């Protein structure tokens, strides 16, 4: 399981407009000792990056009001955020193609399993420990 190793906790941004999905993923992130922030749509996520906030990993839902997940990925990448892992998460069959075209690092179908989330966080923690 992901854990707080030397250094700071893994910082995750969850971009999700459906409250139930948000609560479930937040609980899994907290169970894995991850510091999580929530944005309810892609525009809120972009605004957080514009404010200078930094995250190790970002989980984007696909279809949200104001700005979709793939649109937010494209905007955030164009702002120079290349060192953050961006993950598209959707039950939508066409979600993977949309996210990968937008510049996401990977795509995970909903519902996400705890083991899948743990594996992604371990990868991010390993990268943090070798680069920082």
Image: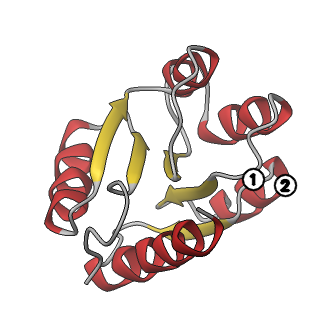
- Label 1 neighbour load within 10 Å: few <14, some 14-19, many 20+: some
Residue 7, quarter of picture:
bottom left
Residue 72, quarter of picture:
top right
Mark 1: secondary structure: helix
> Is there CB contact under 8 Å for labels 1 and 2?
yes
Residue 108: x, y in percent? 52, 70
Residue 56: x, y in percent? 52, 52
- Label 2 neighbour load within 10 Å: few <14, some 14-19, many 20+: few
Which residue is the site of mark 2? 101
Q: Is 44 on the left-hand or right-hand side of 100?
A: left
Residue 15, quarter of picture:
top left
Which residue is the site of mark 1? 98
Residue at image position (22%, 69%) is: 32
Q: Is 92 on the left-hand or right-hand side of 102?
A: left
User: As displayed, is residue 110 above or below residue 17?
Assistant: below
User: As displayed, is residue 91 above or below residue 62?
Assistant: below
Q: Nearer the viewer, residue 18 or 59?
A: 59
Q: How is the image coloured?
A: secondary structure
């Amino acid at each position: 399981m992901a854990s707080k190793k030397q250094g700071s906790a893994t910082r995750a941004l969850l971009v999700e407009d459906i409250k139930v999905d948000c609560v479930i993923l937040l609980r899994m992130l907290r169970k894995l000792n991850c510091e999580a922030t929530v944005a309810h749509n892609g525009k809120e996520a972009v605004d957080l990056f514009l404010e200078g906030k930094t995250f190790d990993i970002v989980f984007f839902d696909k279809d949200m009001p104001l700005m979709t997940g793939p649109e937010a990925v494209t905007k955030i990448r164009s702002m120079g955020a290349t060192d953050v892992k961006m993950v598209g998460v959707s039950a939508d069959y066409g979600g993977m193609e949309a996210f990968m075209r937008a510049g996401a690092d990977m795509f995970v179908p909903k519902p996400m399993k705890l083991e899948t989330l743990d594996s992604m966080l371990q990868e991010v923690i390993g990268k943090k420990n070798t680069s920082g």
